[in-house]
Amino acid sequence: MSHQQSPDNVSIDEIPVDIDNTQSEEIDPADVPDEIESITRGLAGEHPPTNPLVVLKAARRWYIHGKGGTDPAFQWAIEWARHLATDTPSDIERFDEFLGYLVTVGFADERHELR
């Protein structure tokens, strides 16, 4: 490991896990690492990521720092990874919830800005 980790800030990869800020109902877009924001915006865009490992990296971050298993960004990332792995249609209702969630947490003012 190339950097020191404190008990309050651990990491499996370059994306830190802030132990004090896990399973939070309050999401501040400024606290979302640039890489995760980019992946998340990509999941909302016209050309979403096609690498399931990249998608799962975002899912992990939203699970830990969002609402856990009920977090819409986590749920959509898992749904998209499932779609990539099985080539089955994705759940459009889950996608709509995801877009609404991104507007709610402040990633955009309107859903159409994300597409």
Image: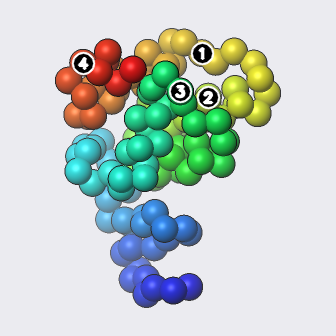
C-alpha distance separating marks 2 and 3: 16 Å
On-image quarter of the C terminus: top left
Using residue 7 as the reference point, say whether residue 59 is left or right of it.
right
Using residue 85 as the reference point, say whether residue 56 is left or right of it.
left
The residue under label 3 is 47
C-alpha distance separating marks 2 and 1: 7 Å
Mark 2 residue crowding within 10 angstroms, few (<14) / some (14–19) / many (20+): many
> In the picture shown, does residue 78 fall above or below 115?
below
Q: Nearer the viewer, residue 4 or 48?
A: 48
Which callout, 2 or 4, points at the residue further toward the start of the chain? 2
The residue under label 2 is 79
Which callout, 2 or 1, points at the residue further toward the start of the chain? 2
> In the picture shown, does residue 92 fall above or below 57?
above
Residue 41, given in percent of the width and then of the height, sits at 40, 35
Which callout, 2 or 3, points at the residue further toward the start of the chain? 3
Q: What amino acid type is highlighted by mark number 1?
A: Asp
Which callout, 3 or 4, points at the residue further toward the start of the chain? 3
Q: Quadrant of residue 96?
A: top left
